[in-house]
Image (cartoon, rainbow, N blue to C red):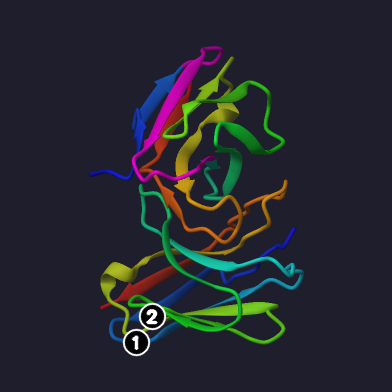
Amino acid sequence: DTAVSQTPKYLVTQMGNDKSIKCEQNLGHDTMYWYKQDSKKFLKIMFSYNNKELIINETVPNRFSPKSPDKAHLNLHINSLELGDSAVYFCASSQDTGGGGEQYFGPGTRLTVT
Amino acid sequence: LAKTTQPISMDSYEGQEVNITCSHNNIATNDYITWYQQFPSQGPRFIIQGYKTKVTNEVASLFIPADRKSSTLSLPRVSLSDTAVYYCLVGLDNYGQNFVFGPGTRLSVLP
């Protein structure tokens, strides 16, 4: 069984479009995260949700919005896509909310904006 | 924010022990030190975590000196499959700070 899954794995779209990336975890964890890994391979957190509450909200453009229908899902919606949004987006989950918890990452979604 | 510094890359040969050191001079009292491994086209995978002294699991050891301003990940007898990027992450408390992985160390294991 896949612990953290993301769909789609690849997403190619044009500037200005709106897209969503879905994430699901079957580990029973309380916290889920979204990370962005850019072309230089820097991995930076964007959001995290704990029990459907946003607890870390990085200084990302408000075109990005996380949506969590329940604690097993954290979807990422992106409005008005820009070229600079091209990156690999990783979803992750952990039992703890802080640095004391191991995070389990999904396989990533490679987003290409043309 | 506890910034980390690691070597950009390292080379090793199969069967050798590899030590990767991470500097985190402004680590906070509540911060844990965590190491992740990432293969191409995959998400990072947890390797080991510690707070002080030494931690060992079936994969690696983590050495943390008393001042906690650095840490060393030790991989015993590496194989070709250990070729990956290794990230040192200094985790934070629950309120409002960043999880910043840093550029990581690209380890190449040669035959």
Quadrant assignment, res A52: top right
Residue type beneath disc 1: Gln
The C terminus of chain B sits in image quarter:
bottom left
The N terminus of chain B sits in image quarter:
bottom right
Depth order, front residue of B101/B48: B48
Residue linked to disc 1: B16
Q: Which residue is drawn at 46% across and 41% down?
A: A90
Badge count: 2
Q: Residue at x 22, y 44 (%)?
A: A1
State yes or no: residue B59 in magenta.
no
State yes or no: residue A33 in magenta.
yes
For disc 1, the chain is: B
Contact (Cβ within 8 Å) of mark 2 with mark 1 = yes
Q: Which residue is drawn at 66% across and 66% down?
A: B31
Q: In this view, does A14 lie above or below B32?
A: above
Q: Is mark 1 on a helix, strand or loop?
A: loop
Specify few, some or many for label 1: CA neighbours under 10 Å numbering under 14, 14-19, or 20 or more: few
- The span picked out in magenta is A14-34
Depth order, front residue of A13/B55: B55
Residue linked to disc 2: B12
* Label 2 – label 1 distance at C-alpha: 7 Å
Residue type beneath disc 2: Ser
Q: Is residue B71 above or below residue A87?
A: below
